[in-house]
Amino acid sequence: MAVKIYMPLPFDRFKEEGELIGRMILEYGELEWMLCLIAGHVLTDLDTAIKALYRSRGELQRMEVADALIRQRIEDNKLKQIYEQTFAHMKVCKSIRNQYAHTNWVHAGSDKLCYVGIEEMAASHEPIKMHNMPLYHLDIDTVIDQARFFNQVMQNMSYLTMEMQHVLGLSTTTGFHYVPNIRRPKQASKLSR
């Protein structure tokens, strides 16, 4: 028996965008897991890494704890630089993930997929009214570019995970591909109200 999962109505019309957005939301959890594995490798204690990271709530706190555990323990300068770049890119992925996970999706007209930025509203000190909610237009090119960015950051996290094991003598496997100079992704455009 096939199970029909509810999707916000705009994704009936914007299926490709919905699929890519859903993948990015899910893939962010994989990025966090890879960061946890790297912490486990540098600590040589996966149990402590998992418990330290996943007992804390929230993506930002988890990332900051992981970074505190990892950054100063990387002795190889080239690997440390790659880690720092990849960690910065992961913050962009977190921002994109949260932007899409904490939104209300709307279909503006016949050709525009839009969303209301709920976190942005919550951070504002201005009273929230229906007419001043931040509305963003998201086109397929932007979503594809963001998915590309996620894919490249995922590739670099895989590289770091394997390379860290190799440098620490935990594995003899090498040869994972690193993507240098990752271009930051496009962002949705805010519609004027």
Image (tube, rainbow, N blue to C red):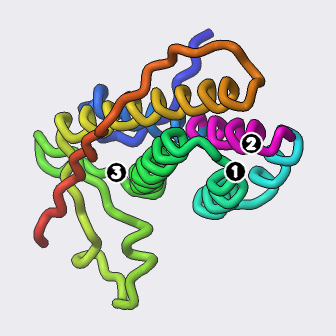
Q: Nearer the viewer, residue 85 or 117?
A: 85
Q: Nearer the viewer, residue 88 or 15?
A: 88
Give the amino acid at mark 2.
Answer: Val
Label number found at residue 153: none
> Label 1 belongs to which residue?
73
> Label 3 belongs to which residue?
105
Q: Which picture quadrant has residue 45?
A: top right
Circle 1: element type? helix
Give the amino acid at mark 3.
Answer: Trp
Circle 2: element type? helix
Residue 123 to residue 78: above or below: below
Q: Position of residue 27 (x, y in %)?
A: 52, 34
Q: Position of residue 134 (x, y in %)?
A: 26, 69
Q: Are marks 1 and 2 in contact (CB under 8 Å)?
A: yes
> Label 2 belongs to which residue?
42
Disc 1 from disc 2: Cα separation: 6 Å
Of pointers 1 and 3, the one earlier in the residue sequence: 1
Residue 183 to residue 53: above or below: above
Disc 1 from disc 3: Cα separation: 42 Å
Q: Is residue 119 left or right of residue 55?
A: left
Q: Position of residue 152 (x, y in %)?
A: 38, 31
Q: Main secondary structure of the magenta part?
A: helix
Q: Which picture quadrant has residue 183?
A: top left
Q: Are marks 1 and 3 in contact (CB under 8 Å)?
A: no
Residue 53 to residue 144: above or below: below
